[in-house]
Amino acid sequence: MDGFYEKLTPQAREGSEAVAMDMWKPYIDSTAIHVPEAKNRIAFDRLHDAKHLTDAVDQVPRQESRQLVFAGDERLK
């Protein structure tokens, strides 16, 4: 990403209204270095947002089930 941003003029980087990307930390870090007010201009793609949300929703029941089994409660088996 650094190479991409270095090819843009300062005016192009300053004039960017939004930068769409996935949530990969190197993309975020590079954008933060090269784009003024990057924090307010980054737009994460929905696919990655949805994946993180789905993973979180999936993990809660698993964790609760493990806790119940550890406590000797087997209602969810």
Image (cartoon, rainbow, N blue to C red):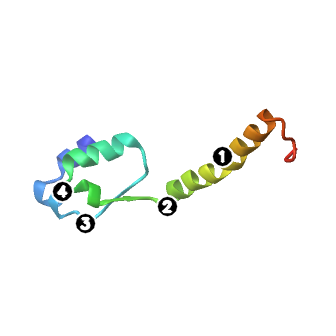
Q: Are marks 4 and 2 in contact (CB under 8 Å)?
A: no
In space, the residues marked 2 and 3 are separated at their CA atoms by 18 Å
Badge 4: residue crowd in 10 Å (few <14, some 14–19, many ≥20): some
Badge 2: residue crowd in 10 Å (few <14, some 14–19, many ≥20): few
Amino acid type of the residue that numbered disc 2 sits on in the rendered structure: Arg
SS category of the residue bearing label 4: helix
Label number found at residue 17: 3
Amino acid type of the residue that numbered disc 1 sits on in the rendered structure: Gln
Residue occupying the far top of the picture: 70
In space, the residues marked 1 and 4 are separated at their CA atoms by 39 Å
Among numbered discs 3 and 1, the one appearing first in the sequence: 3
Q: Is residue 16 left or right of residue 75?
A: left
Identify the residue under disc 2: 46
Among numbered discs 2 and 3, the one appearing first in the sequence: 3
Q: Are marks 3 and 4 in contact (CB under 8 Å)?
A: no
Q: In x, y percent, where is residue 53?
A: 57, 55
Q: In x, y percent, where is residue 64?
A: 71, 45
Amino acid type of the residue that numbered disc 3 sits on in the rendered structure: Glu
Identify the residue under disc 4: 13
Q: Residue at x 56, y 58 (%)?
A: 50
Q: Residue at x 77, y 33 (%)?
A: 70
SS category of the residue bearing label 2: helix
Identify the residue under disc 1: 59
Q: In x, y percent, where is residue 75?
A: 87, 47
In space, the residues marked 4 and 2 are separated at their CA atoms by 23 Å
Q: Residue at x 55, y 51 (%)?
A: 52
In space, the residues marked 3 and 4 are separated at their CA atoms by 9 Å
